[in-house]
Amino acid sequence: MIDDGEEVVERGKANLLVFESLTKKYGAITAVDNLNLKIGRSEFFGLLGPNGAGKTTTIRMLSTLTTPSSGSIYIDGLKIDRNLTGIKARIGVVPQHMNLEGEMTAWQNLELHGRLYGLKKEARQQRIEELLEFTELSDRAHDLARKLSGGMKRKLMIARALMHRPEILLMDEPTVGLDAAVRRKMWDLMKGLNKNGLTVLLTTHYIEEAEILCGRVGLMNGGKLVELDTPDNLIAKTGRFVLEYFENGETRSRFFASRQDAIQSAAGMEGGVNIRPANLEDTFITLTNRKVGG
Amino acid sequence: MQFMTILWQEYVLFKAKFWSITTGTMIAPVLYLIAFGWGLGSGMQVGGSSYIDFVIPGIIALTTMTVSFSTIANDINISRTYTMTFEEFMIAPVSMLVLALGKITAGALRGLYSAFIIILLAMIFRAGLQVDGYLLLLTTLNCLVFSALGFTAGLLIQSHGDMAKFNSFIITPMSFLCGTFFPLDRMPSGIKEFIWLLPLTHTTLALRDRGSDILSAFIHPVVLLLYLLIFLVVGVMICNRAE
Ligand SMILES: Nc1ncnc2c1ncn2[C@@H]1O[C@H](COP(=O)(O)OP(=O)(O)OP(=O)(O)O)[C@@H](O)[C@H]1O
Ligand SMILES: [Mg+2]
């Protein structure tokens, strides 16, 4: 199954990002377990998995915040290292948690980033204005970052990651806590960036998000990459719709390729039935159970 | 460039909190001056001069130490474990050496600012304090040494509680024992020699003696420089492995 995914990469684009036997151990916990993965230039890649799967740890190793226990990561064939400033300048990071400087304004947060990445004064100011407009934060430019709403902070973190025009954008659950409308806007924003050639590595719990955005998806569990495929293939493997029903004192679920099939099957049932689109948890649980079962 | 950026950020934050920093920095030295200058000092003589003149160099040494140390140690510790803003520097194309130098210089500048405040206060309290290049050099070195120690401690120490412990067991004892409030030779031998090895002792002695003895005038800054070098190297090494 992992080979299927590889073909998509090989089909045209050069490998920009290569993870080679990447492993990270925290004491007895193996957060990332022998990860082998190649991501092509301008690809939109999604890393999915339940809590504790190792997604953030992978992103942190890629952004040099954490050093691997073994294995390596290459960008354009260069092995990443905390002191290799040239490589670090090619990456932009939107972390899972808020890490803006709360006591500085939105503008100053972007300025700090621009200065750290060596942007000259005029280029810096122009870029800040451009990005504040892009993220609809222009009117909040001189508010302290801690006074912005959660969604605004997220948008500011995305703007910050884009300040230095990175080649690779790492986003760790960038849409958690955003309202539906803002989330949709963020999706458009990310898609647009990717169309312009930006390589994106995104982690998410939402398979619809991956489905809309990602060309390819890697499914992680317990630090291991257990699936690698297009979102379509991944969802099709379980069924796109779930029928949840109550039987013998417990909630059960069945999967269907379409809503119609699910409705038909639910027709004869009594009591509370629920039909909803399948999500990652469904896909994930089913896929792993199937593997265990043989 | 990035070195200046780190200082720029500290300047922005300093400007935003100018008054609370300034008044906060003043409290301890003012209390020392009242207690040891007016309270105890008026009738007391140490080594032929009034006690307040004796104690001012000690107050400069210990205040610049605590300010430089705690500014940078808390900044690194909080930004690493609580606000997570340290990540912005770690992922940036900045080498760990430049990062360390920037942060250490920023902490030292805050220490120097506190020295400036004490010198002003000393004038108000009419203490005899001679401000010259040697005092500036030694104070700057003292600030750099303890800022570098703060950088290392901020990276190593994981929790706020442990930071408080470090303060209680290392910084506070030094601030009282390193010749700051009373001459070193009142200490029992054995302990005296140990205290002589500590960096703060050299700052205090140098600020008080003022090169009256050429050899020690030279030794004190050299010892401080050695400490600075060691703390810097250790700090960069730890920064390279920090998670
Ligand atoms: N600094 C750390 N010290 C010890 N263990 C850690 C550390 N960081 C992560 N872990 C462990 O590594 C494993 C993977 O964590 P990670 O944060 O990478 O998961 P994740 O896939 O991002 O999960 P989530 O969806 O909840 O964000 C977890 O078991 C976690 O407890
Ligand atoms: Mg995570």
Image: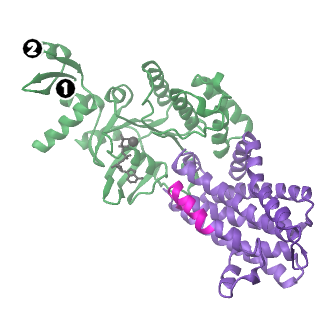
Q: Out of B157 and A285, give the one closest to the viewer.
A: B157
Q: Name the amino acid type tagged 1.
A: Gly
Image mark 1: chain: A
Residue B189 horizontal/vertical position (percent): 68, 88
Residue B141 horizontal/vertical position (percent): 76, 67
**From what the image shows, is residue B4 above or below residue B139?**
above
**From what the image shows, is residue A15 above or below residue B196?**
above
Q: Looking at the colours in the rendered structure, which chain would you say is drawn in green? A: A
CA gap between label 1 and label 2 equals 23 Å
Image mark 2: chain: A
Q: Out of A38 and B25, give the one closest to the viewer.
A: B25
Residue A28's image quarter? bottom left
Task: Give the residue number, with chain letter if any, for mark 1.
Answer: A239
Q: Residue at x 21, y 27 (%)?
A: A236
The local secondary structure at tag 1 comes to loop
Of labels 1 and 2, earlier in sequence is 1
Task: Give the residue number, with chain letter if any, for mark 2.
Answer: A270
Question: What number is the disc on residue A47?
Answer: none
Q: Badge 2, how many Cα within 10 Å: few under 14, some, many 20+?
A: few
**From what the image shows, is residue B83 above or below residue B167?**
above
Q: Name the amino acid type tagged 2.
A: Glu
Q: Residue at x 76, y 77 (%)?
A: B222
Q: Nearer the viewer, mark 1 or mark 2?
A: 2
- Image side of residue B96 versus residue B59, left or right: left
Principal secondary structure, stretch drawn in magenta? helix
Residue A43 horizontal/vertical position (percent): 41, 36
Q: Out of B126 and A278, give the one closest to the viewer.
A: B126
Q: Residue at x 27, y 28 (%)?
A: A279
- Image side of residue B228 versus residue A29, left or right: right
* Magenta extent: B155-170
Quadrant in the picture for the C terminus of chain A: top left
Q: Looking at the colours in the rendered structure, which chain would you say is drawn in purple? A: B
